[in-house]
Image: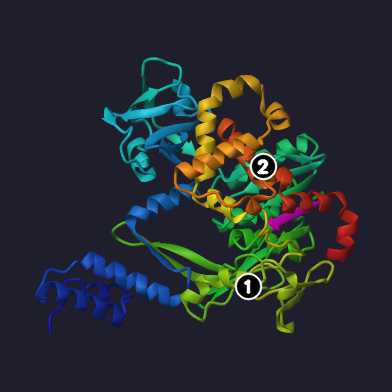
């Protein structure tokens, strides 16, 4: 029997199991004796992936090349030139430079087209987001030379941009949505989340917004400690926020520890079927302590704690080590014992079974009923957080044709072209966002131009009977224009004006005593 070169590891601390050595020896035999050359790296990666998939849906392998991308979104920054961009007709179009970022400092402006990077032509060639990232991102302090084509300027402009750390914000929007009511939309729980939330919350409080709508729809989670810190902003005293427990992990409890800026005032949290993990920790704690009203649809149901473990080549595994429980003891994780495919199809099955459009289609056995910790009202376990006020998925907001305009990016591309062509005129016409919001109107003629553009690129316009009411698509059109002229904050400020779920949340805060009498007591 051959003795492997690494078998001495077993003698160091006795931590290598017989099965680990068995697999190592299997690889050794393959490399030494197999008839063809063997890609050991691929074999090991596939073996790791396959085994993790059999454990649970959230234990995963992350290749070394994907680790950096993952860390960027959670750490809240990357290193680059600081622009938001879109690719239009194989041309890199600057939507907006990041405020006070490297590009803005040297004079890059919205509407600029970057045509060369370090002398390499990138205009009119096949261009992808990944290609742009490779060209423009790089270590802080390094330089990148770009040539820009600017509207109404005869000659191309050359800039040298010094890369720097660029923030990735976790708050998409924060503004006073109604008198005394603040609105914050949070897209992830990253390392910068609490700094952003505290800054936004204090500004809202100074404006007189002592009540809050926290929008966690579509928020798939992030760092546990950020979820705990955010929940701590709403809960007073030393209240339990969440606890974790697993076969190899003792129970660990997380409590509110310090005064929060929104411990008082009316609180609504919006969730939907895409709200997961950290979002569920916050909404579950608020619900269990009767601190606010949860509105929307049942959340995703991801309640597994992952620990990131590095592997020698820079890759890592994200291994499930425990489960999340709300303060009442509800397990957040939905069942996954029927296999990965059924787990992945679970949201679609909710839609198919009617759960997303009708609260009457949802039923819970008595074993999944829990009592809240202040008022003793009934809440439900079984995976995910069931809201206090159900709001059905709006399946009639857009016609089938308009959904295609959105899904295939036709509307987005048309608005980009429209703003690009009219940017100077619009900036002169609308002195600020308030002026734009009050006076800019998406006319029927603009929609006709959109339809004509759709035909040009091969999307057939449906009969007018499919498009009887086009108010929703007009509002989305206006929101896209606001985004391209200003920022995502203004995008949501426009879009939310006709969003029935957001408006209902405002109504709940305005009629708080009526709703709390039904929901919280």
Start-end of magenta stretch = 266-270
The reply, left or right, for residue 185 in relation to residue 457 is right
The structure residue drawn at horizontal position 54% and vertical position 30%, both measured from the top left corner, is 419
Which sits in the foreground, 452 or 69? 452
- Where does the image place residue 233, in percent across and percent down from the top left? 71, 51
Q: Nearer the viewer, mark 1 or mark 2?
A: 2
Q: Is residue 154 visible?
A: yes
- Residue ID for mark 2: 475
User: Horizontally, is 209 left or right of 120 in the view?
Assistant: right
Instruction: Say which of 357 and 402 sits in front.
Output: 402
How many residues crowd around disc 1 within 10 Å: few (fewer than 14), some, or many (20 or more)?
some
**Mark 1 to mark 2: distance in Å?**
35 Å
Instruction: Name the residue: 58% across, 68% down.
Output: 347
Please tell me how crowded label 2 is: few (under 14), some (14-19), or many (20+) other residues with Cα within 10 Å. Answer: some
Q: Position of residue 91 (x, y in %)?
A: 38, 34
Whether residue 269 is in magenta: the answer is yes
Name the dominant secondary structure of the magenta segment: strand
- Write down the quadrant of residue 327 in the picture: bottom right
Q: Which image quarter is the C terminus in?
A: bottom right
Residue 476's image quarter?
top right
- Residue 81 pos. (x, y %): 41, 32
Secondary structure category for the residue under label 2: helix
Count the labels in the image.
2
Picture disc at residue 255: none
Q: Mark 1 falls on what kind of element?
A: loop
Residue 457: percent from left, percent from top: 44, 44
Q: Which residue is mark 1?
A: 383
């Amino acid at each position: 029997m051959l003795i492997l070169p690494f078998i001495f590891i077993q003698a160091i601390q006795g931590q290598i199991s017989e099965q680990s050595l068995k697999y190592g020896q299997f690889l050794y035999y393959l490399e030494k004796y197999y008839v063809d050359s063997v890609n050991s790296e691929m074999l090991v990666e596939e073996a790791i992936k396959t085994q993790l998939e059999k454990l649970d849906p959230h234990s995963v392998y992350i290749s070394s090349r994907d680790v950096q991308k993952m860390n960027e979104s959670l750490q809240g920054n990357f290193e680059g030139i600081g622009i938001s961009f879109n690719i239009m007709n194989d041309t890199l179009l600057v939507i907006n430079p990041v405020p006070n970022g490297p590009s803005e400092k040297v004079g890059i402006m919205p509407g600029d087209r970057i045509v060369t990077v370090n002398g390499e032509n990138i205009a009119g060639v096949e261009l992808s987001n990944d290609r742009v990232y490779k060209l423009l991102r790089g270590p802080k302090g390094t330089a990148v030379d770009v040539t820009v084509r600017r509207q109404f300027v005869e000659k191309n402009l050359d800039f040298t941009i010094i890369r720097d750390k660029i923030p990735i914000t976790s708050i998409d929007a924060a503004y006073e949505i109604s008198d005394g009511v603040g609105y914050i939309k949070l897209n992830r729980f990253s390392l910068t989340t609490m700094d952003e939330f505290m800054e936004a919350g204090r500004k809202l409080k100074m404006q007189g917004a002592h009540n809050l709508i926290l929008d966690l729809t579509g928020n798939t989670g992030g760092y546990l400690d950020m979820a705990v810190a955010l929940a701590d902003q709403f809960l007073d005293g030393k209240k339990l926020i969440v606890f974790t427990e697993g076969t190899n992990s003792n129970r660990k409890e997380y409590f509110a520890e310090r005064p929060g800026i929104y411990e008082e005032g009316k609180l609504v949290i919006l969730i939907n079927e895409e709200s997961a993990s950290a979002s569920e920790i916050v909404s579950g704690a608020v619900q269990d302590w009767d601190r606010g009203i949860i509105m929307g649809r049942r959340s995703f149901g991801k309640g597994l704690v992952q620990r990131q473990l590095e592997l020698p080549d820079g890759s890592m595994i994200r291994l499930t080590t425990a489960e999340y429980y709300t303060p009442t003891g509800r397990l957040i994780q939905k069942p996954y014992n029927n296999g990965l495919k059924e787990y992945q199809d679970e949201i679609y099955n909710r839609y198919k079974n009617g759960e997303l459009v009708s609260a009457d289609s949802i039923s819970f056995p008595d074993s999944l009923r829990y009592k809240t910790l202040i008022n003793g009202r009934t809440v439900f376990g079984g995976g995910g957080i069931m809201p206090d006020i159900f709001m059905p998925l709006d399946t009639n907001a857009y016609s089938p044709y308009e959904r295609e305009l959105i899904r295939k990016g036709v509307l987005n591309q048309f608005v980009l072209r429209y703003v690009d062509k009219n940017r100077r005129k619009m900036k002169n016409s609308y002195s600020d966002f308030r002026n734009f919001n009050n006076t800019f109107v998406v006319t029927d003629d603009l929609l006709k131009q959109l339809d004509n553009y759709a035909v040009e690129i091969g999307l057939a316009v449906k009969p007018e009977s499919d498009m009887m009411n086009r108010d929703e698509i007009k509002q989305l059109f206006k929101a896209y224009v606001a985004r391209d002229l200003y920022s995502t904050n203004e995008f949501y400020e426009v879009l939310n004006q006709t969003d029935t779920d957001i408006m209902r949340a405002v109504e709940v805060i305005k009629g708080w005593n009526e709703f709390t009498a039904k929901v919280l007591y």
